[in-house]
């Protein structure tokens, strides 16, 4: 696997604490610049204080913001087929305060070609659980970043990238059944221009809406972790539609 490090585009989300010591991922930015993670170009300022979402019908489900009226995009671009990094603030990752998150990650994209009112999202990457590496959240804590492969078959244009951490610590009951429970979603979004796809075509399969993409009863969202935070039976399937696969016809 070859990482084109000179063209890596990274997002940075810092972990921080709220009053009730719930650890949350905050902030997001392209981070191949020395100011990261303070540079949060693509999120409204108040988004940095927004807690995770458990209500699957929340209008803010897509990006933890009301609407997708991001500030103007900066001169960033992503090229089809490249690897890029989703990175978290290293210093705060090793903080001993706050509960430990346990769960998978999903990465999504949506074209804004038809506006942002009715975005159709497709899933471009995931990391669930493995016996060797643990949860996605364990990997983040160890390595501080995730490598994501940008699909190489998209039409050029503007997209919203959505990266999501799902904490399953309270997933033994649905949030609808018990408002103190439910899987907790930490999505963060940013907007960028995509170009350079090798076999560009419109995405027509695996498209979902937020809210709507997840059901409270999805197998990967309704489960009791073991006492040490593992999935029952050591096996876990990340929720969501089939991954967008760039090797198709
Ligand atoms: C981010 O901002 C904080 C507070 O202003 C500052 O202490 C820190 O050095 C900044 N980090 C970077 C990487 O610029
Ligand atoms: C993104 O693409 C749009 C449409 O081609 C263009 O108007 C805009 O300048 C581009 N923005 C950046 C930051 O490259
Ligand atoms: C957290 O601390 C451990 C042990 O000191 C270290 O191995 C690891 O690299 C650190 N993780 C990050 C993301 O800095
Ligand atoms: C999780 O455990 C609680 C308490 O034992 C139980 O009420 C609940 O039904 C369990 N949830 C699942 C998905 O098995
Ligand atoms: C496409 O799917 C196949 C079979 O699931 C998988 O082996 C391959 O890695 C996928 N390709 C990409 C680029 O995701």
Image: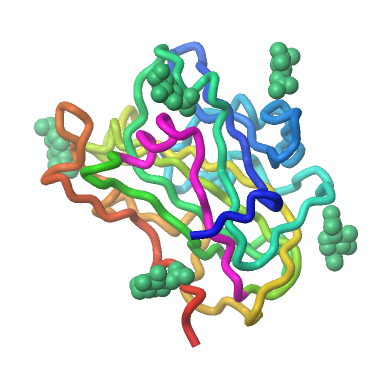
Per the rendered image, the range of residues in magenta is: 135-153
Foreground residue among 131 and 107: 131
Q: What residue is at 73 percent from the left and 71 percent from the top?
A: 156
Q: Is residue 35 above or below residue 72?
A: above
Residue 42 falls in image quadrant: top right
Q: What residue is at 29 percent from the left and 31 percent from the top?
A: 169
Q: Is residue 17 above or below residue 218?
A: above
Asked if residue 152 is among those painted magenta in the image, a careful observer would answer: yes
Where does residue 163 sit, x and y in percent of width and height?
53, 47
Where does residue 128 sit, x and y in percent of width and height?
33, 49
Residue 201 falls in image quadrant: bottom right
Give left or right: position of 231 versus 159.
left
State the count of labels. 0
Whether residue 23 can be seen here: no
Q: Is residue 47 above or below residue 16?
A: below
Q: State which image quarter holds ligand 5.
A: bottom left
Where does residue 239 sit, x and y in percent of width and height?
34, 56
Give left or right: position of 139 versus 81.
left
Foreground residue among 124 and 132: 132
Where does residue 151 sit, x and y in percent of width and height?
57, 67
């Amino acid at each position: 696997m070859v990482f084109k490090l000179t063209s890596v585009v990274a997002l940075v989300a810092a972990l921080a604490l709220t009053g009730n010591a719930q650890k949350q991922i905050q902030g997001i930015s392209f981070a191949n610049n020395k100011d990261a993670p303070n540079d949060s170009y693509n999120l409204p300022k108040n988004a940095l204080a927004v807690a995770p979402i458990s209500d699957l019908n929340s209008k803010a489900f897509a990006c933890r913001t009301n609407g997708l009226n991001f500030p103007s995009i900066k001169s960033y671009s992503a090229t089809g087929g490249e690897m890029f990094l989703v990175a978290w603030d290293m210093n705060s990752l090793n903080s001993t305060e706050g509960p430990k998150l346990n769960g998978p990650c999903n990465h999504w994209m949506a074209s804004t070609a038809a506006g942002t009112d009715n975005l159709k999202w497709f899933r471009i990457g995931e990391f669930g659980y493995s016996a060797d590496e643990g949860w996605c959240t364990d990997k983040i804590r160890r390595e501080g970043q995730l490598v994501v492969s940008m699909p190489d078959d998209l039409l050029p244009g503007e997209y919203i990238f959505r990266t999501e951490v799902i904490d399953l610590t309270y997933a033994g009951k649905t949030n609808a059944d018990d408002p103190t429970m439910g899987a907790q979603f930490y999505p963060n979004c940013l907007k960028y221009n995509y170009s350079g796809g090798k076999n560009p075509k419109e995405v027509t399969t695996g498209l979902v809406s937020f809210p709507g993409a997840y059901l409270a009863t999805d197998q990967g969202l309704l489960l009791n972790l073991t006492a040490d935070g593992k999935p029952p039976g050591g096996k876990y399937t990340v929720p969501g539609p089939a991954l967008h696969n760039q090797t198709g016809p």
